[in-house]
């Protein structure tokens, strides 16, 4: 979004909604809480987890619950800054300026402004060229996060000296324009502005934009601003235009991105109550239903002061049963519950760059049964610190970059669980663990409504991880030519490259290539020195695939997507029967989704 121009009064473009920022591929919020847990014998000594279709456990069912990749248009580049004056018009009187005299500048030094005006020195300038020099000064203020008006005034320039008068904008006050909002208290919005800007100080456009964006981030309102003159020359007031958002918003989606073992076809519903208590809070309810699973997550978040910090707490519950014919005799089922909380700080909030710090904690309980008896009953706790951000630029036609880095420390407690002894003699997932996760992406604008999207994600851990903490290569958020949960391990990475083309306002077509590698066990030997893998099974291997997808948006609130992907090469570690981990054998994967927002 373009930064505000220098002349006053000024209408600011609408702030960028936080939801509009492109991010690395991630699932909806409920995806990260649906952590089932079912003990399996895959970690026992000498057992190849790929030797036969693998009985899914709680974590593996959860990890693949991911939505399709976002298809957001990259931000348009800023207009190129003029590097020099326009040529004089034929026949127009012109003059060469040897010296610029600047009056009224305090925020920027003479050296900074004179450097910006250097291309205007000793070159023929007509009246438009002289005026462009004044505009260059105003643009320089804008580039440094300040605002000023400039004027030339009546003067004789035949001696080659041009005087530019500068009136620097000073912030005077913030006030509401139009109808007062109902979703959020007006005084709260004024406090957000006061936390960033002090009356009497030179107007700082970076601070002003931060205040507007933080206000606009509040659930329940959409906030824009305009600048108008104050009571004294140079004084500037920020006028807020606030529109109430709907109290209730939601999204329903039908897709087949689930695990075959609990039902690939899923119906999800996400509901949000925006500012129900009138101070920018938000209550959320997310539900998922498939043939073999039921999931519910409730969350509540609220602002913590006028600096944009937020607190959130959530709880979730899952009931599941394995419906796959491969495991029908086991009658496997279970449940899990999660309690969590987080605190978020917007370290940097601007139209072109953002940086956020998030600290979170979770406590989880798992209960699983198979063959009529309890197979595991245990808990896990974790703390996570994450830094995420995005950056928009005008390189090569404009693009959007995003990144997220997180560190997680946790503990799996198998004390009293029926699978504790088997785990101690095999993978040893019980106890403390650490893992690192990295996500990167760039969407590059190309000519003819096309874009190139490159994304990557990686995980590293020096320990064998519980299934809930592992990563998988397969699925709609990974190598799309393989089913959900295929090729899971403690460490790995996935890289995707997409070429996207917007054919019409309603249609987007794209082709893609996905590749990834997985390390099944960080420590592939049991305490007795035996391999946790079958002799023919590699501990490190990769998967690749390619395909295409189409997105149809017949209405702003309706979106349908179809994806087809084919594997490249053979699976390096198939089961003994040649089937994938979920028991399927398809060389071509087809995915669909249909969503309705309201």
Image (spheres, grey):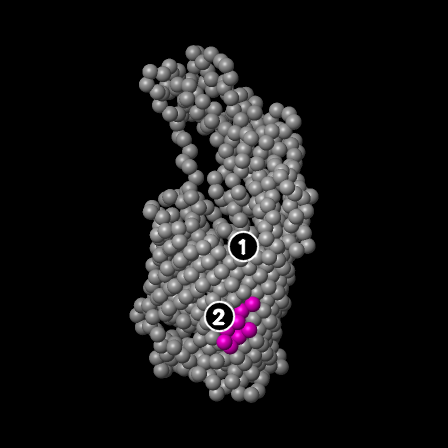
Q: Position of residue 587 (x, y in %)?
A: 33, 72
* Residue that appears at 62% across and 39% down: 178
Magenta range is: 287-294
Task: Identify residue for label 2.
Answer: 266
Figure check: 50 above or below 124 = below
Hey, which quadrant is residue 78 in on the image? Answer: top left
Q: Residue furthest front?
A: 555
Depth order, front residue of 591/98:
591
* Residue that appears at 40% across and 53% down: 506
C-alpha separation, residue under disc 2 versus residue under disc 1: 31 Å
Query: Is residue 113 part of the magenta span, yes or no?
Result: no
Task: Identify residue for label 1.
Answer: 387
Q: Is residue 19 left or right of residue 301?
A: left
Q: Residues within 10 Å of mark 2 (few under 14, many from 20)?
A: many
Q: Residue furthest left?
A: 569
Mark 2 touching mark 1, by CB under 8 A?
Answer: no
The dot on residue 415 is none
């Amino acid at each position: 979004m373009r930064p505000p121009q220098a002349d006053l009064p000024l209408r600011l473009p609408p702030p960028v909604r936080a939801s509009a920022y492109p991010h690395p591929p991630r699932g909806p919020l409920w995806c990260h809480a649906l952590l089932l847990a079912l003990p399996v014998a895959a970690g026992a000594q000498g057992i190849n987890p790929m030797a036969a279709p693998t009985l899914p456990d709680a974590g593996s069912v959860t990890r693949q619950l991911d939505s399709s990749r976002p298809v957001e248009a990259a931000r348009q580049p800023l207009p190129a800054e003029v590097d020099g004056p326009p040529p004089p018009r034929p026949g127009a009187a012109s003059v060469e300026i040897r010296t610029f005299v600047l009056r009224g500048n305090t925020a920027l030094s003479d050296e900074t402004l004179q450097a910006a005006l250097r291309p205007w020195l000793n070159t023929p300038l007509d009246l438009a060229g002289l005026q462009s020099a004044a505009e260059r000064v105003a643009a320089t203020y804008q580039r440094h996060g300040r605002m000023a008006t400039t004027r030339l005034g009546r003067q004789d320039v035949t001696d080659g000296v041009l005087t530019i008068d500068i009136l620097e904008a000073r912030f005077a006050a913030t006030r509401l324009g139009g109808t007062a909002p109902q979703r959020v208290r007006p005084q709260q919005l004024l406090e957000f502005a006061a936390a960033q800007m002090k009356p009497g100080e030179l107007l700082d456009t970076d601070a002003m934009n931060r205040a507007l964006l933080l206000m606009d981030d509040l659930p329940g309102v959409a906030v824009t601003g305009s600048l108008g003159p104050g009571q004294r020359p140079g004084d500037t007031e920020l006028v807020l235009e606030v529109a109430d958002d709907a109290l209730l918003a939601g999204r329903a989606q039908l897709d087949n991105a689930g695990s075959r073992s609990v039902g690939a076809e899923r119906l999800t519903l996400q509901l949000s109550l925006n500012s129900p208590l009138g101070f920018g809070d938000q209550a959320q309810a997310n539900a998922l239903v498939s043939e073999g699973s039921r999931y519910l997550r409730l969350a509540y978040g609220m602002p913590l002061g006028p600096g944009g910090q937020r607190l959130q707490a959530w709880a979730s519950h899952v009931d599941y049963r394995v419906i796959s014919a491969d495991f029908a005799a086991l009658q496997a089922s279970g449940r899990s519950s999660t309690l969590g909380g987080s605190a978020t700080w917007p370290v940097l909030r601007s139209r072109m760059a953002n940086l956020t710090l998030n600290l979170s904690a979770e406590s989880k309980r798992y209960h699983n049964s198979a063959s009529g008896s309890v197979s595991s009953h245990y808990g896990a706790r974790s703390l996570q610190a994450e830094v995420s951000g995005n950056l928009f630029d005008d390189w090569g036609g404009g693009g959007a970059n995003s990144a997220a880095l997180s560190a997680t420390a946790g503990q799996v407690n198998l004390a009293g669980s029926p699978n504790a002894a088997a785990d101690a003699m095999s993978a040893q997932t019980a106890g403390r663990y650490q893992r690192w996760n990295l996500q990167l992406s760039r969407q590059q604008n190309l000519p003819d409504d096309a874009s190139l999207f490159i994304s990557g994600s990686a995980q590293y851990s020096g320990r064998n991880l519980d299934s809930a903490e592992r990563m998988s290569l397969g699925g709609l958020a990974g190598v799309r030519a393989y089913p959900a949960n295929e090729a899971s391990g403690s460490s790995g990475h996935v890289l995707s490259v997409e070429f996207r083309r917007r054919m019409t306002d309603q249609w987007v077509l794209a082709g893609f290539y996905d590749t990834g590698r997985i390390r099944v066990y960080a420590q592939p030997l049991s305490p007795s020195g035996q391999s946790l893998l079958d002799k023919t099974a590699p501990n490190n291997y990769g998967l690749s695939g390619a395909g295409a997808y189409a997105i149809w948006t017949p209405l702003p609130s309706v979106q349908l997507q179809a994806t087809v992907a084919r594997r490249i090469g053979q699976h390096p570690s198939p089961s003994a029967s040649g089937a994938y981990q979920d028991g399927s054998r398809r060389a071509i994967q087809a995915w669909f989704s249909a969503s309705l927002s309201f």
